[in-house]
Each structure stands twice: as C-alpha cells, then as structure tokens.
Image: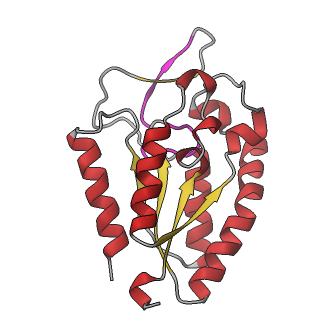
Amino acid sequence: MSKKDKRIILIAQCLINPYCRVHILGQNFPLSHELTNYLMSHKVGIIQYSCPETTAMGLMRNPQGRQQYDNEFFRAHCKKLLKVPMLMVNEFVKNGYRLTCFIGLENSPTCGIHWGKHKVNRYNTESPNPIDKSEPSDPKLMGIMAEILSEELHEAGISAPFLEFPTQSPPDSEVRKNFWQELEAAIEQP
C-alpha cells in the first residue's frame, strides 16, 4: 500500500447510520450509501464516533438547538465518546496514515461545522430551526461535539479540514457540488 493510499476519515455516526438522527427529521439512506461508496471507492478508511445525542438522550428525543447541549454534562459526555476514536486516529497517524478530514452534519447542534443564528422557541431557548435570513455578523459556531473534536485534534497535533455534509441541499445543488469538490481535495491532498 502506497503512502498515498493510507488515508482515514473521521465522520459523524448519523452519516453512516441514519437511524441515529432525531426521529422527526427522518433517515437518509441514499445519502449514507453515496458517501460510503465514495469513500470506499477511494480507499479511505472510516472512523466514526458514537452519536452523542443518541447516547445521551436516546432515539426518541426531541430536536434541540446548540444552546441546550452547551453544558458541562454534555461536554463531558462528548469527551468520553471521543476517547476511543481519538486513540484510533492517533494510532493510524503514528503508523503513517493521514487523517484526510472530519465530516459533520449540516445544522446539527452537536456535529455541525457552521451553526449560525437560530430561531427562539416559546420557552425562550434556541430551536433547531435557523433564522430565515442570516446576517454576515451573525456568529458561526461549531456544534458541541465538533468543537470538542477540534480541541482534541489540536491537542494531539493533528491538522485536518472540517467539512459539513449539506443534507438540507438538493443533490444537484451548487452547495452539494461544492461539498464533493472539497471532499475530493481533502482526500487527494498529497
């Protein structure tokens, strides 16, 4: 196996197992199929971490915003879930593999990369619904798990781009086409 072929990727679990997604958002098996086929055809090994929302709150949870997950208990839970995947990433890197990137999920309060301003619900807490029109000055935060993963990779001295799968964009959209171009660039980087 050449050095070029020694590639791994770290991804959010719901991109491989759509059943982990919040029940009312539905599952997207064609998306998972497309992504895994692409990675396998490019000989990229997949490391996934357990879904922090599912492991903390079960399958029948209600959708929430980032605000509800941003607490010490959930952050500790995320760090615990990342222990084994980070050991795996470190072991692969130590043995000459390259972490090509991390793929998170669009509009996920835990695994999203560009969490923007969201609507507030009747309880005065952030909802999972983005505002209708964002402003350039609106904050762009990572989801809680993505933020912690970024810190863990930085601490380990591992650099890799963070990509966000645009699940809310149609397959033929420019946003989706741009994602595939960014993924190809991350994977094919020497």
State left or right for residue 138 relative to residue 91.
Answer: left
Check if residue 111 falls in the magenta segment.
Answer: yes
Q: Is residue 177 above or below residue 122?
A: below
Q: Position of residue 185 (x, y in %)?
A: 29, 68
Q: Please, what is the dominant secondary structure of the magenta stretch?
A: loop
- Residue lying at 64% horizontally and 79% vertically, measured from the top left: 90
Any part of residue 75 in sight: yes
Q: Quadrant of the C terminus?
A: bottom left
Q: Is residue 51 above or below residue 5?
A: above
Choose between 115 and 17: the one closer to the eye.
Answer: 17
- Residue lying at 77% horizontally and 57% vertically, measured from the top left: 80
- Residue lying at 32% horizontally and 74% vertically, measured from the top left: 188
State left or right for residue 36 relative to residue 55.
Answer: left
Residue 52 location, quadrant: top right
Q: Is residue 98 above or below residue 44?
A: below
Q: Position of residue 127 (x, y in %)?
A: 54, 22
State left or right for residue 95 relative to residue 179.
Answer: right
Choose between 73 and 20: the one closer to the eye.
Answer: 20
- Residue lying at 58% horizontally and 8% vertically, measured from the top left: 122
Any part of residue 141 in sight: no
Q: Which residues are magenta?
A: 108-121
